[in-house]
Amino acid sequence: MAIHPLRLWWQRRGGGGGGQERAIIALGLTVLLLAVASWLRERPIAGGLRPPAGSSDPALVHLTLVRDAQKKGAVCLDGSPPGYHFQRGFGSGKDSWLLHLEGGGWCNSVASCASRKMTALGSSIYMQHQVPFDGILSNVPSQNPDFYNWNKVKIRYCDGASYSGDVESGIQNGTKLFFRGQRIWEVIMDELLLKGLANAKQAFLTGCSAGGLATFIHCEDFRALLPKEVIVKCLADAGFFLDEMDISQRRFIRSFYDDVIRLQNVGKNFQDCTSRMEPSQCFFAHEIIKNIDTPFFILNPAYDIWQIQHILAPESSDTRQSWQRCKLNIHNCDSNQIESLQGFRVALLNALSDFQHNRNGGMFINSCFIHCQTMSNITWHSPNSPKVNNKEQTIAEAVGDWYFNRSKVKEIDCPYPCNPTCINLDLAQPWPGPM
């Protein structure tokens, strides 16, 4: 029987153990993102349905490495230049720009960052030369009705701190490592401005997961790059990570973030916040959003599969592995676990309570057991896209209605298991493709 790669990845590293777990969840999110993408492409969903017949194959877009990045010290963990994939807009979209910040977790120690630099999340040497543009990056009108013909950029993630670290030295405890995420953000923006972003009439900064958190961090920076008359908005997909206690009443994720911030000197991005509270608390979106004036859209599942696995029930707090089956498939959760999941949902809604009154903000909180939802055609815009509150509105339509001011969008789903349109991942099933 085939073994799911997420489970295999965990077994190979011994699973569990507090300090060890904090180090390896940095790569765990990457594996999950890859798993989600493959699962959505390969597995039957929503009662056996697949993507509509005749769906166009995604465009493959080449990797561009940033010129002179190394001279400016704007480098990946291993010292290689950062990169991005750029597809020119056309027709009515030629003066519109959509940027997407790739996600992939964080590294919180010299050891975990050194391991990461041997992958595409720490070095452009290992990045794919071509990537498919799906979901919000698709150039097919039926898959991406509002943004299909825009200039679209996928910015690759290779710094391990949501594009925000900035350490001068390239040697960390005797290991060659560069923490330059802030500089990477700056040189890529400089290059894109020269390629036409400076002439944009409307622009949209988006990101998934750790890239979604980066969207919170850099939204105001992005706004400042362009003239005031340009329409600029931001969207974070699965980037609203919660500062909540886990099942053993520890704040595991806050401790993890504290390691990231200290290691990569991230705290200087949040000086107003760090004067009032611990730097690790300032790395959470519910604090960052307080200082964002640019119109912002928050897309998040109430039962984010990564947060359930690593914030609510991390391996080190689940010593008896009683949550193991639940974390792989929400249908396996017992009544006590469902009660904990509902409490986690309530914590999310409480953290969003102030934002709900933001008149320029948008929100789409569904009750699905999934992570990012903008990067797959199925979840973004298809007959199987999750709907909320009995509205026949896909995620793409909700985002488009908000961006173009066609309607206000503040959608909050009813609690699990009320929504039959949800795509709930089942990571316990045998993997359909090659390992």
Image (spheres, rainbow, N blue to C red):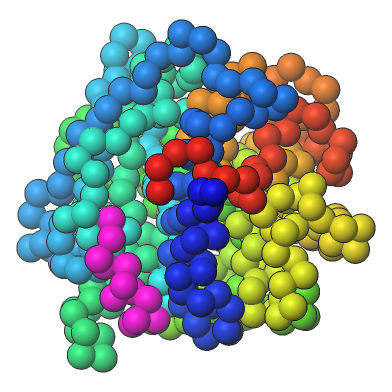
Does the segment drawn in magenta span residue 184?
A: no
Residue 177, given in percent of the width and then of the height, sits at: 23, 76
The residue segment tinted magenta is 109-120
Image: 278 above or below 48: below
Q: Residue at x 50, y 82 (%)?
A: 20
Q: Quadrant of residue 183?
A: bottom left
Q: Residue at x 42, y 60 (%)?
A: 162
Q: Residue at x 65, y 72 (%)?
A: 314
Residue 382, given in percent of the width and then of the height, sits at: 59, 19
Q: Residue at x 23, y 36 (%)?
A: 130
Residue 12, given in percent of the width and then of the height, sits at: 45, 70
Total tally of numbered discs in the picture? 0
Does the segment drawn in magenta span residue 111?
A: yes
Residue 353 shown left or right of residue 67 in the figure: right
Give whichever of 29, 159 is nearer the camera. 29
Give whichever of 212, 222 is nearer the camera. 212
Q: Quadrant of residue 159?
A: bottom left
Query: Can residue 87 be seen from the camera position used here?
Result: yes
Residue 227, given in percent of the width and then of the height, sits at: 35, 36
Query: Can residue 201 be seen from the camera position used here?
Result: no
Image: 348 above or below 377: below
Q: In the displayed orientation, state which residue is furthest to the front.
A: 1
Q: Quadrant of residue 403?
A: top right
Give whichever of 254, 295 is nearer the camera. 254
Residue 323 shown left or right of residue 223 in the figure: right
Residue 205 shown left or right of residue 62 in the figure: right
Image: 155 above or below 122: above
